[in-house]
Amino acid sequence: MGRYRNLTVLLLVIFAQLLLLAYQVKTSQDVRLVRVWAVTAVTPLARFIEGVRLGTTNLLEQYVLLRHQGEENRRLKGELGRLKMESQRLRSELETADRLRVLSEFQPRTPSRTLAARVIGTGTGASSKVVFVDRGSSSGVMKGMAVVTPDGIVGKIIAAYPTASQVLLVTDPSFAAGVISQKHRVHGTLKGRGYGACLVDYIQNEQLVESGEWFYTSGDDGVFPKGLPVGTVTSSRPGDTFKQIYVTPTGPQRGLEEVLVVLEPVHQPIPNGQPAATGIYVLPPPRPEPAEAGLAAGGVEAQRAPGTDADRLREQYKAIGAAQGHTYGAGAPGAKPPDFNYRPSPPAAPPANAAGAAPKP
Amino acid sequence: MTELSDRILSGRPRGPRSPRFPWWGLLVVPLGAILFQVYVPLWVQFLAYLELPLLVTVYLALLRPSPVGGMFTGAAIGLLQDSLSHQPLGIFGIVKTLVGYFAASVGMRFEVDHAVVRFVLGFFFFVFHQLFYWVLARALLGEQVTFQVQQTFFVGLLNAAVAVPLFHVLDKLKERP
């Protein structure tokens, strides 16, 4: 009898949860109250732990620094250790500052109004591609808003709670966004796959999309404004019905610590060139040195000057052959070769002012 | 029969003098497991493979004197996990309800304090959890998720290996009446 009682209770509990699931799926409505309770209970704790972690790290750093300063007899070793730690800390701070600088530079550059947010947790479940950010409805964040970094799109807000919001990442299998290719302006739908690259679906096999081509948001989905970078095509091949195009999303590539929530999206045109590199400075090509510039005075001749050692040797042999009237490959086997030790005189430099120079009497 | 099998089949000694898990632990431990899953993988991504809420469900259910108690423990932890995921409430709830029920049933019949038994239970319930989650996600939500057998096997072993010391640590929280 007891066994049936247990089984009955089990079936009742499962049935109740099935009803709850069916209600949510059928009406597409969430049981918001339960989620608000859970998120409100957990996110402050996550914030607290993050605060404790940062505080402890700082305290430990300061403790070690003070300890090093106090050990006068091991001053040099201590100094080295301190400098190493200092360097490490500064590097870390520099990276953080760099990320924040990129964000702050990106914010005024984009026409959309954005809000900076920090990632404070991940969703539950090993395959979950969801993160929590520390900005919620009290900061103006609403469900359906886009989340981006200067490198590209990251995801969208799927739930906004008072103190935090839940972001569905581009890599989640349930994520979808309208995209357009840069070069051929082909429209498609970006879909997450749970890992790695995303799939761009609904592009006909006849349409042209090349590897390495950039995809941007098309603005068709009502979430992402048009013109945000999405990623580059890593693979494009014909499929059964539609092309199989895989795109590596660039938004989350540098890790997710700080992101921007797009509060008021504004559409932008699709840029023609590659999206501006935000964190990497590329040097312009070096200017020619004065000596090289002097040699290059001959203009076209200078551009044709040999580049490698082999080229220079070839030119040298050519000059030796020409000076001795020898044509390479023309002589019979056993014929006398040219004297390779012969040094042909360098061509006389043209006079600086040949036209005006008069012979001395 | 060997001494180990005798010990396993003898069932758990229960009585008024057997140590009990404190009431506050029933709140703090599951909340800590959920918090771990929400927060720690941010810094150590590898740890996202640890299903601590599941291991805690198994542990607490093994302690319950009846399957109904284990079932409600699993349901509560599962629903809390659901509420922090992006899926409709109930998927983790149903899976962990079943895990709690079966774990409590096992705990009533067998001696489950032995490390080997705990390892096997940790592995078995992890695979059961992942398989059932996959079935429900496909059948009820229509999600095109794939069940990766090899990954589940290895991650199951990892979780089982973690379960043994974790259960040992949680044993230390027990109070003698």
Image: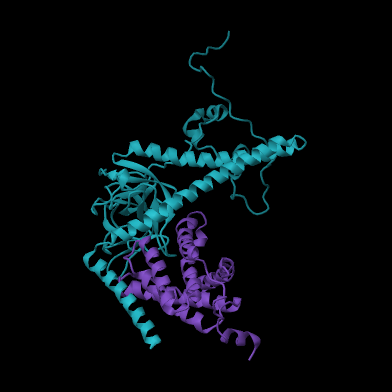
The image position of residue A114, as x and y in percent, is 32, 42
Q: Residue furthest right?
A: A73
Q: Which quadrant is home to the C terminus of chain A?
A: top right
| Residue nearest the observer in this picture, A126 or A71 | A71
Q: Colour of chain B?
A: purple
| Residue nearest the observer in this picture, B45 or B11 | B11
Q: Is residue A242 above or below residue B106?
A: above
| Residue nearest the observer in this picture, A242 or A296 | A242
The image position of residue B76, as x and y in percent, is 39, 68
| Residue nearest the observer in this picture, A233 or B87 | B87
Q: Quadrant of residue B80?
A: bottom left
The residue positioned 67% from the left and 46% from the top of the image is A337
The residue positioned 40% from the left and 55% from the top of the image is A41
Q: Which quadrant is home to the N terminus of chain A?
A: bottom left
Residue B71 in sight from this viewpoint: yes
Q: Tell me the cyan chain.
A: A
The image position of residue A75, as x and y in percent, is 74, 35
Q: Residue furthest top?
A: A361
Q: Is residue A351 above or below residue B104?
A: above
Residue A253 in sight from this viewpoint: no
Q: Quadrant of residue A187?
A: bottom left
The image position of residue B55, as x and y in percent, is 50, 70
